[in-house]
Image: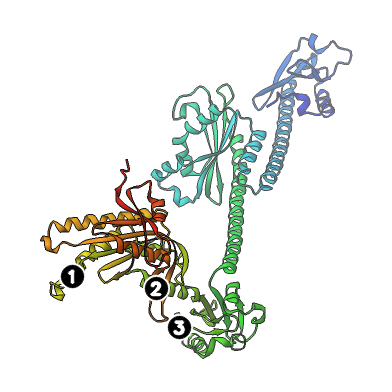
Amino acid sequence: MSKMSIRRLLNRRAATDYLERFTKLIPNVRLALIEHSGRAVVDIGAADAAPVSDVAWDRVQPVEVEGQNVGRLVAAGEGLSDPQAEATLDILHQSLVMMMKRAFESRTLAQETLERYREINLLYSIGETISASLDPDVIPNLVLAEAARVIHADGGVVLLLSYALDPEDREDIDALEEQIYQLSVESDFGDKGFTNIMHTATLSLMVEALASGDAYIWAADQFDYETELVGSILAAPLKARERILGFVLLGRDPQEPIFTADDVKLLTALAAQAAVAVENARLFADVISQRDAIAAMNNYMDNIFASIASGVITINAEDLITLMNNAAEQILGVPAEETMGKSYLEALPEMGSNFVSLIDVIKHKDKSVVGYEMEPVLPDRGQVVLRLNLSPLKDNRKRNNGVAIVVDDLTERRQLEAQMQQIRQTFEQYVVPHVVEQLLSDPTSVRLGGVRRAVTILFADIRGFTSFSEKLQPEASVEVLNRYLTLASEAVLAEEGTLDKFLGDGVMAIYNAPLAQPDHALRAVRSALAIQEAVKDIHSELPPDDCLHFGIGVTSGLAVVGSIGSTKIRNYTAIGDTVNLASRLQAQAEPGQVLVDKSAYGHLKDHIIARELGYVQVKGHSEPDLVFEVLGLEDAS
């Protein structure tokens, strides 16, 4: 508060008139009203007299207002000897003090009113600034900027909870202690060390503040730990509709005066406005987020609806088509614009009478139909296989409002299933199971109608089995034959060859078909050598008279491979000169011998030990063929 003075409390002319009236009551008296500085405000009764500072005053009465000395009332002269003079001067003194007190009170009230007006105007201006933003990330910065503008502080922090706490949420102190540690710093100003202390040194104090919802001034001796950096902290809750969203903290150095009650009122009012702004910004952000999410979902659903493979058709209660997506157009071969608003009976006549019956069931029995398959004949596509799922459409009162139809085109799937079944039936008896699964995983890789490709053919025949079987009963002959053919077929399948057929007491195998095998010639030779080794193994278990041998021929070259036969019975096999030559070489082979042609040898020469046998004339060839005998495999190391 500035030092009071008589000049500020009394009008000089009014004071002069007042004192002049009193001098008339006590003649021959000089009266003066002197400020504490010694300067005369009013001097009555001595126009030609000495200055007040040179006068030895006979009577001096201090003038105090609200405990503060503002000056003195002084008097001198012969008139003071009048018995009434002292009482008159006392009345004058009391009157002047009373006048100045009233003047002081009026000035104080006016000043307080002005300050209150300025405060309200300031808070209104601050509120407009903060409320103008709907960005929850910007508002904390605005709050601190405005707080620092109206309240001196060396640092500030805005702390926010993850969600607002209602009064009932603030009754459990243990839960509040956990919430305090969830407070996040959203904005700050000042030295980082200073603001960090403001936050961490008041955690236990903020539990009480959070529970009460009131503003607090904390001195350094109340902090959770000692510090010489922060002298006092002013904390005000961000509270809107009794819900606390966080705190605004302002701090001062120890050299600065502690915060005052006026500071508390200002920051509390500012924090209340800020809390409303934060809550509004959060609500606005939620609305925007929900709007964007709904828009994104609508776009997403539109995109899904437009690109979904299933056809979707909706029919209203009057049997008129109200929706048909792109997939339904493609499946049914009908443009959507030609069906919209038309009766489904008129727009989709090819769907047949069963379709009409299904619609009636949905509409009148309020039941869904799932997985109904039909095979209509469509103008542009011919016969197709469709699966229908039909459900009633309901309004918000759960009343039937039409029918929703989901159409899946199973035509290609059924064709693929038929193709896969044909592949399974064709190859299960020829190749090992995992090769069948490979073929089924990519049915398009198999062409059953016959294709020209490079293959290796193996023919293996049991030497002398015909004469051997004449010594045995038929059942015993079959048992021996099956034993030898089993070991041959196992050797073929072990190298993923295709077991083409059994030829009496022989076997034919194909390599590099139906699946590609870059090392098909080597696989065939490994199978041939494995057959010969397996024969040696079973010979150790048989009497010498029962020991038989295989003669094997292997050739490489082009052949036509595919499912060959009549319209009703077909076999997967290979035909061509390469096949015939393999059979001829097998016929030339001695028991236990493996013969290969020149072409196969060209694939194998780096992998096998072989002996050239020279040229051999075979049936069906005008020129002899160069033949090699396979003695074994090269050491892989």
Figure check: 160 above or below 15: below
Mark number, residue 467: 1
| Label 3 packing within 10 angstroms: few (<14), some (14-19), many (20+) | few
Instruction: Say if mark 1 contacts mark 3, CB within 8 Å.
Output: no
Q: Amino acid at mark 1?
A: Ser
Q: Residue 369: tell me if it is visible.
A: no
Mark number, residue 599: none
Q: Amino acid at mark 2?
A: Gln
Disc 3 target residue = 367
In this picture, residue 104 sits left or right of residue 381: right
Disc nearer the start of the sequence (1/3): 3
Mark 3–mark 2 distance (CA, rounded to whole Å): 35 Å
Q: Position of residue 237 (x, y in %)?
A: 54, 42
User: Which corner quadrant holds the N terminus?
Assistant: top right
Of tags 1 and 3, the one toward the viewer is: 1
Secondary element type, mark 2: helix
